Image (cartoon, grey):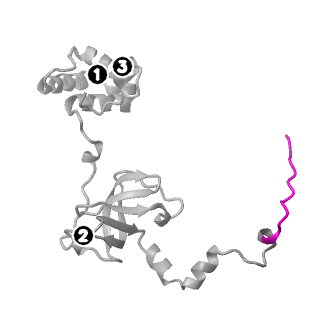
Amino acid sequence: DASAIHPESYTAAKKVLKQLNLAPDAPLEERERKVDELRQSTSTAELAAALGVGEPTLIDILDQLVRPGRDPREDLPAPILRSDVLSMDDLYPGLELDGTVRNVVDFGAFIDIGVKQDGLLHRSQIPHGTVLNVGDVITVAIEKVEKERGRIGLAWPGKAADEQSAPKQQKRAKNQKSSNDKRYNDKKKPKVDWAIG
């Protein structure tokens, strides 16, 4: 199975093959022809309801029958390339570029900025309340480049400059707790009143 059909959708995929009167190993040309005929004769919403699957799942199954192993990220817009930035050697801190979000993970987002290596926009750099999705085109600033490790650190434009311009004392004070603050010096455990409702 070279397709990217999720194992939970195998039953639905078998139903689609049966509906199309296709064997799982049918030639690609035959699959393309039958999927095209099906799409022209029936709406995907009707077929999805008849098969008991969601319409997006059915569309993915049909796409995988025609283009097995297709990575959906291939359909995303290409990054907006600059003629003066062709490799990691052309990058420097502070340079702003447009890029395409290629992957979103717990610790941030990987952004294609048009060089061989995607850059990492760490979650600490993403403004609170901002939601990034795969395919979004955003502007980022180069924070650091580690050529020997093949890493590109990205920042939200303006955010890195704001943090770098703040005096180090202020940054440190922000993270330290005041020794005069009773909340942090009181050795007793706080009294908790439990309300049961």
Q: Which residues are magenta?
A: 185-197
User: Left of 62 or right of it: where is 177?
Assistant: right
Distance, label 1 to label 3, CA atoms, is 20 Å
Give me the disc on residue 88.
2
Q: Nearer the viewer, residue 83 or 91?
A: 91
Q: Nearer the viewer, residue 190 or 113?
A: 190
- For the residue labelled by badge 2, is the local secondary structure a helix, a strand or a loop? helix
Identify residue for label 1: 42
Is residue 27 shown above or below 121?
above
Q: Residue at x 19, y 26 (%)?
A: 36
Q: What secondary structure is the stretch in magenta mostly built from?
A: loop
Give me the disc on residue 11.
3
Q: Residue at x 83, y 66 (%)?
A: 187
Quarter-wise, where is residue 144 in the image?
Answer: bottom left
Q: Quadrant of the C terminus?
A: top right
Query: What amino acid type is highlighted by mark number 1?
Result: Thr
User: Left of 40 or right of it: where is 179?
Assistant: right
Whether residue 47 is visible, yes or no, is no
User: Left of 106 or right of it: where is 115?
Assistant: left
Is residue 17 shown above or below 85?
above
Q: Residue at x 32, y 76 (%)?
A: 95
Residue 194 lies in the magenta-colored region: yes
Q: State if disc 3 and disc 1 touch (CB < 8 Å).
A: no
User: Left of 194 or right of it: where is 82?
Assistant: left
Distance, label 3 to label 2, CA atoms, is 46 Å
Is residue 73 shown above or below 10?
below
